[in-house]
Image: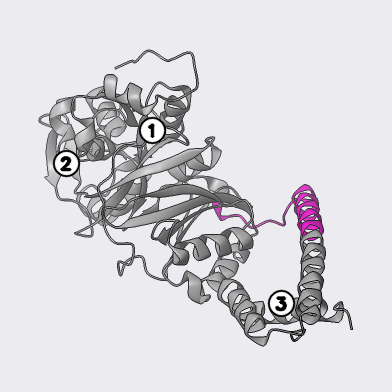
Amino acid sequence: MKLPVQDTKAPLTEAQLCDSERRFAYLGPEGTFTEQALRSLPEAGGSSLLPAATAAQALEYVCRGAADAAMLPVHNTVAGPVPDTLRALVESPSPVVVREVVLEVEFALLVRPGTPLSRVRTVSGHPHAGTQVRRWLSSHVPHARWIAAPSNAEGARRVKDSECDAAVAGLHAAARYGLEAAGTEIQDSSGAATRFLLCAHRGAARVPAPGRAHRTSLIGRFPSRSGQFAVHLRELKKHPVLQEVSLNVVHDGPDSRLLLADCPGRMDRPETARAVGLLQLSLPGLRSLGSYASAHPVKSPSERSRIMTAKATTAEADLSVEPAPGDVARLREQIDALDQSLIGALQQRLAASKEIQRLRMSGGGARIDSGREHAIRDRYTQTLGAGGSAVADAVLEMCRGLAPR
């Protein structure tokens, strides 16, 4: 199905959405779990659905105005985060999440009618699906070669066109591609679920969301030698403000990592705002995907205090190399700029503190307000952890030293 592409990059307004047919992109082709997740939304009924070959293409449709939003798989409870989706979210300009859908997934082995398991020599499907059915395949088709596909439905399409013997996909895809199931419920772990995100362009009219539990997500790409980034995240997780935050990491080449951070609550909650602020302070370049309706509370046992790591389907993902000199130089320039901003902010704070102390003393008051200093020290500690108290003491001492005598 093809849709006309608008000439303008501006998304539809709320009024236009009310007067026109909604258009949704999704990771295709037809028959994917992503399409199933999209069709579970009331808004999708009667709407135009546009399958995309990749997550990046689906978001491109949104940016170009060919679709109002795109549904993408982002995480599976067994296989972890979906690298292609995280990469597309990082590289797409101004994506914002407007809704979440969680589906339990069950897989079937789909073949052309009359094909016995003994004749299956190649099996295709999404890498995440392959991870979830590895033991079943090893037991029932031990000699079959796995061929990764952009989606499970694409694997089914390859079987239909005799490019492959079998596909791991949802049973609902069988009728769509004229196939039959040689095995059902073949996943190694029962109860597996995949999380999907409905993404729009920032500033576009939001898809109406029910008032249930909410979460706020952030995305970013960071240079890192193998292991160092994970250590940094583990240290961050020790901070009391981040105890309920879920951090999901994907290798994106030998010296790059993608991070998806999920915080409980909306940005108008002080606890959420503190968590987001601390993450962005500790990881410059981490940008918000917005606050949105969650399919379930964030504080689920499967997500609490966890750092999930998934390896991309590239050969170089396991390599460990030193960071490129250009990366180090760029980061040092960024640090120098941040230091200059901090120095400027401290100079302004010194001037304000000096004026406050002058006014207090001119009115016969004490130069130092111990209650105020205590509150400031608590603020630094809550935001920056144990080291924040030392930073606050240094700032307060410096400001006291410049007070008039």
Q: Give the Cα distance between marks 3 and 2.
A: 66 Å
In the picture, the disc for residue 205 is: 1
In the picture, the disc for residue 150 is: none
Q: Give the Cα distance between marks 2 and 1.
A: 49 Å
What's the image's color scheme? one colour
Question: What amino acid type is highlighted by mark number 3?
Answer: Val
Task: Compare residues 122 and 41 and report the one nearer the observer.
Answer: 41
Q: Position of residue 359 (x, y in %)?
A: 78, 74
Q: Position of residue 51 (x, y in %)?
A: 32, 26
Q: Is residue 20 left or right of residue 285?
A: left
Note whether residue 22 is visible.
Answer: no
Task: Compare residues 176 and 113 and report the one nearer the observer.
Answer: 176
Q: Is residue 398 above or below residue 340?
A: below
In the picture, the disc for residue 391 is: 3
Question: What amino acid type is highlighted by mark number 1?
Answer: Ala
Q: Secondary structure at mark 2?
A: helix
**Magenta highlight on residue 331:** yes
- Considering the whole magenta stretch, tell me its main secondary structure: helix
In the picture, the disc for residue 117 is: 2
Q: Is residue 198 above or below residue 30?
A: below
**Magenta highlight on residue 235:** no
Q: Position of residue 212 (x, y in %)?
A: 26, 55
Quadrant holding the C terminus: bottom right
Q: Which residues are magenta?
A: 317-341
Question: What amino acid type is highlighted by mark number 2?
Answer: Leu
Quadrant holding the N terminus: top left
Mark 2 burial class by Cα count in 10 Å: few <14, some 14-19, many 20+: some
Tell me, yes or no, whether the two marked residues, 3 and 2, touch with CB atoms within 8 Å: no
